[in-house]
Amino acid sequence: MRILALVPARSGSKRVPNKNIRLLGGKPLIVWTIEAAKGISEICDILVSTDSLEIQSISSEAGAIVPWMRPSELSTDYATSVDVAIHALDKYENEYGKVDGLLLLQPTSPFRTEKYIRDGIRRYLVGGGNSVIGVSPVREHPSWMATIENDQIKLLDNRETSNLDSSLPRSLYVINGSFYLSSPLTLRTRYSFFSDVTSPLICDSIIESIDIDTEAEIEFAKLLLENNKL
């Protein structure tokens, strides 16, 4: 089994400048993800897709490969993760040989563990090559969610909140952004990480499922490290 781990890390980030190489616990954010994937036998390579020479250097030193730079048209706000994944997959297979799966590991999930990655790969193998996507339990009651229209609150399910059961429906999950594993066939034919049969990789840990996308989330991650919460 040969699984290519892909870490997408472009240089542009509007909300958090240089997010992928911001220091967290004394090391660049992207290094957390690279180190979590190292040593997993099913992963043939950890490939970083970037348009930044600095990210290329940091990633290479951490043990990933960065054999080419991401083209400018795939480094904009409009390029999707699937765009980047298929580009990396095509170039990698052309130069290094076929793979059995592509595993997208976003650098914004620094606290996902090696065990979590191994569990996801195991589910992929048991499922015979179908997709596996990381999810977390919904932590806010969906029935309490609302939109605001014409400066008025509109509940999504049109029920009064005073009549709602406050307990969370445990059958609801949200994509947490930490793990996407699909076959090359799924990516190329469906243009998606989701296949006809997509297995969940459930993460119950709030810490492991952190997805850093703001300055506040970086500060929260630093606080967790400082207080030995990992």
Image (cartoon, grey):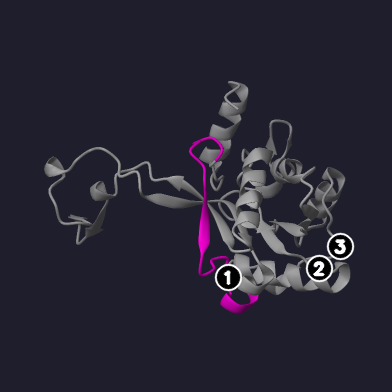
Range of residues picked out in magenta: 188-208
Q: To which residue does mark 3 refer?
A: 67
Foreground: disc 2 or disc 1: 2
Instruction: Tell me, yes or no, if residue 202 can be seen here.
Output: yes
Q: Position of residue 217 (x, y in %)?
A: 53, 39
In the rendered image, the residue lying farthest to the top is: 227
Q: Nearer the viewer, residue 120 or 89?
A: 120
Q: What amino acid is at disc 3?
A: Pro
Sort mark 1 into few (<14), some (14-19) or many (20+) by Cα contacts within 10 Å. Answer: few
Please give the name of the residue rendered at 85% of the width and 69% of the height, measured from the top-left corner. 97
Please give the name of the residue rendered at 58% of the width and 70% of the height, measured from the top-left corner. 78
**Residue 35 magenta:** no
Q: Which mark is residue 200?
A: none
Please give the name of the residue rendered at 36% of the width and 50% of the height, measured from the top-left corner. 172
Q: What amino acid is at disc 2?
A: Tyr
Instruction: Tell me, yes or no, if residue 71 can be seen here.
Output: no
Q: Which mark is residue 92?
A: 2
**Kind of element beneath mark 2:** helix
**Kind of element beneath mark 3:** loop
In the rendered image, the residue lying farthest to the bottom is: 189
Left or right, residue 32 beside residue 77 = right
Q: Nearer the viewer, residue 123 or 67?
A: 123
Q: Position of residue 159 (x, y in %)?
A: 14, 52
Marks 3 and 1 sit apart, C-alpha to C-alpha, by 24 Å
Q: Mark 2 or mark 1: which comes first in sequence?
A: 1
Q: To which residue does mark 1 refer?
A: 78
Q: What amino acid is at disc 1?
A: Tyr
Q: Mark 3 or mark 1: which comes first in sequence?
A: 3
Q: Position of residue 21 (x, y in %)?
A: 72, 45
